[in-house]
Amino acid sequence: MATAARPIIVVKKKGGHAGHHGGAWKVAYADFVTAMMSLFIVLWLMNASNAVKKAIGGYFKDPRGSAKTVGTNMVGTGQNFSLSRGDLKDIKATLQRSIQQMSEFEKLKDQIEFTITPEGLRIELLETKNGTFFDIGSDELNQSGRDLLITLAQQLGTFPNKISIEGHTDSKPYSGNGDYSNWELSADRANSARRLMQQHGLRPDQVTQVRGFADQSPRVLGHPEDPSNRRVSLIVNNFVKPDGTPDAQQISPVTGGKAAGVEAEEGSPKQF
């Protein structure tokens, strides 16, 4: 009798460790980290200044720095930005908010004038028949003048812009020492403003010019003895590039200012 064939039984044993999952989790984790980094960059850019936004945009448009655009060929901490009208308006609004918080704002508001010019943001501190910032015929600041200049210095010191300071007088001859004239008085008043502002916020290298004009650049043409011709002017200068060329966004002249050589934004200087 023939013997029946025995069935062949194959026994498969499972290992004690799970199989290899591959690197899919690494890809998912990398996507998560990238998304978080993008979120933080967007949040930072939303709170950055307009100048920083323009610099970053200029880099992505011209990463090799071959074109003369904002964000390329940068040196230091931004001293070669060229500001646009919108940037100067932001600075102007910041300064106005600070001045409005002063206790004497209502008294001084008609003596402070802001004008955007091709040179930059011009801030005029005007004297009136009854309101002054300096003692009569002196370069000594009174309390109102000191408080206002200190408030401006604390804000301007936070900006990278360079500052120019001008002194102006009316056409009445100086009645003091015969060797001392409106030329000396206008320059000394501008220098007094510089010293005080550098003591209370302006950086030592922030002021680039101190200029005295005497009565040669009146604010009110045709009325050389008008009290508002006596003034101190602060100019928040536009930036220029290292090669000295203006940026395409730089402000174009808009005529209509009251003072000789002063061209106003939208036709006339703006007070509060």
Image (cartoon, rainbow, N blue to C red):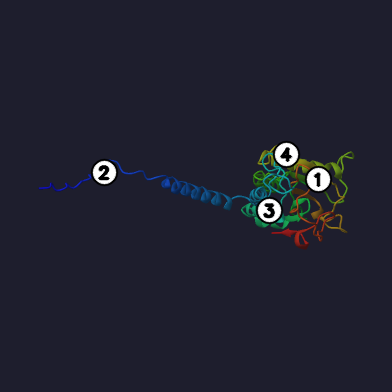
Residue type at mark 1 is Gly
Which of pointers 2 and 1 lies earlier in the amino acid sequence? 2
Q: CA distance from mark 3 to mark 1?
A: 37 Å
Residue 89 image offset from top left, x and y in percent: 69, 56
Label 4, on which residue?
195
Q: CA distance from mark 2 to mark 1?
A: 103 Å
Front one among 63 and 167: 63
Looking at the image, is mark 4 or mark 2 nearer the viewer? 2
User: Which secondary structure, mark 2?
Assistant: loop
Q: CA distance from mark 4 to mark 2?
A: 86 Å
Residue 267 falls in image quadrant: bottom right
Label 1, on which residue?
137
Looking at the image, is mark 2 or mark 3 nearer the viewer? 2
Residue type at mark 2 is Lys
Q: For the residue carrying disc 4, how many other residues have a C-alpha within 10 Å: few (<14), some (14-19), or many (20+)?
A: few
Residue at x 66%, y 43% (from the top left corner): 157
Q: Are marks 2 and 3 in contact (CB under 8 Å)?
A: no
Residue 270 image offset from top left, x and y in percent: 73, 59
User: Which secondary structure, mark 3?
Assistant: helix
User: Which secondary structure, mark 4?
Assistant: helix
Disc on res. 87: 3
Front one among 207 and 179: 207
Looking at the image, is mark 3 or mark 1 nearer the viewer? 3
Which of pointers 3 and 4 lies earlier in the amino acid sequence? 3
Q: Are marks 3 and 4 in contact (CB under 8 Å)?
A: no
Residue type at mark 3 is Asp
Label 2, on which residue?
14
